[in-house]
Amino acid sequence: MHNSLWATTTISYTACAAQTFFFLLFISTEYFLLTIMCYDRYVAICKPLHYGTLLGSRACAHIAAAAWASGFLTALLHTANTFSLPLCQGSALGQFFCEIPHILKLSCSGTHVREIGLLAFSAVLCFGCFIFMFFSYVQIFRAVLRIPSEQGRHKAFSTCLPHLIVVSLFLSTAFFAYLKPPSISSPSLDLALSVLYSVVPPTLNPLIYSLRNQELKDAIRTMMTG
């Protein structure tokens, strides 16, 4: 934000490390929370009579704390490991923020095997969460389609739709940013994709979820009509 407002393109080493840590903390915690929210919808629709037992206030607090703790540990490991590497290829990042893949390009050849291992572990963990969400939504849609009333099906779908939109937006942009073929990679494309997955989903989240709030709908309707 400082660089954007003052038109500068420099950042200190310490600030870069802090930026990397907080970026990883928030983006990994968001992903874990999206996974938990998927489980919340699965229990609410597929096991409604057990909802109070499986997702009471104490259970929700423990699950949320586990998500933040996992995000904190992930961010700490990646940040500590990345910034323990010597930088031998200069100090210019081809990105608008301190992102690990771009920092690794500046490290000495053969010195970032540990970070590659950590990235592989994180990829497996993210893929596991994705598989969990996929099969949860398969069960949710099967349960919704068995609901006899159209109003009941509409209510169930409206409960899942905001979460599904956020997850799809988050995963599609992140997957394409990191898994796109090298043949179509370019600095400008990498920059645009980084903005998409790091800025757009968090910006749209409040809007997407708030549109289900009836009081907010009424307030917007009143403001537009009067």
Image: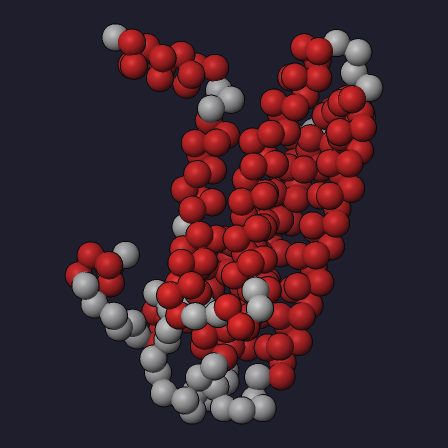
- Residue 36 vertical position relative to residue 100 in the rendered view, above or below: above
At x 65% / y 17%, what residue is drawn? 154
Residue 3 locus on image (x, y percent): 24, 63
State left or right for residue 159 relative to residue 8.
Answer: right
Residue 116 locus on image (x, y percent): 62, 77
Q: Is any part of residue 100 visible from this angle?
A: no
At x 62% / y 70%, what residue is drawn? 119
At x 36% / y 87%, what residue is drawn? 90
At x 29% / y 14%, what residue is drawn? 223
Count the numbered circles shown.
0
Most extreme residue toward the left is 6
Residue 72 locus on image (x, y percent): 55, 59
- Residue 124 vertical position relative to residue 164 in the rendered view, above or below: below
State which quadrant residue 10 falls in.
Answer: bottom left
| In-front residue for pair 198/72 | 198
Q: Is any part of residue 107 visible from this angle?
A: yes
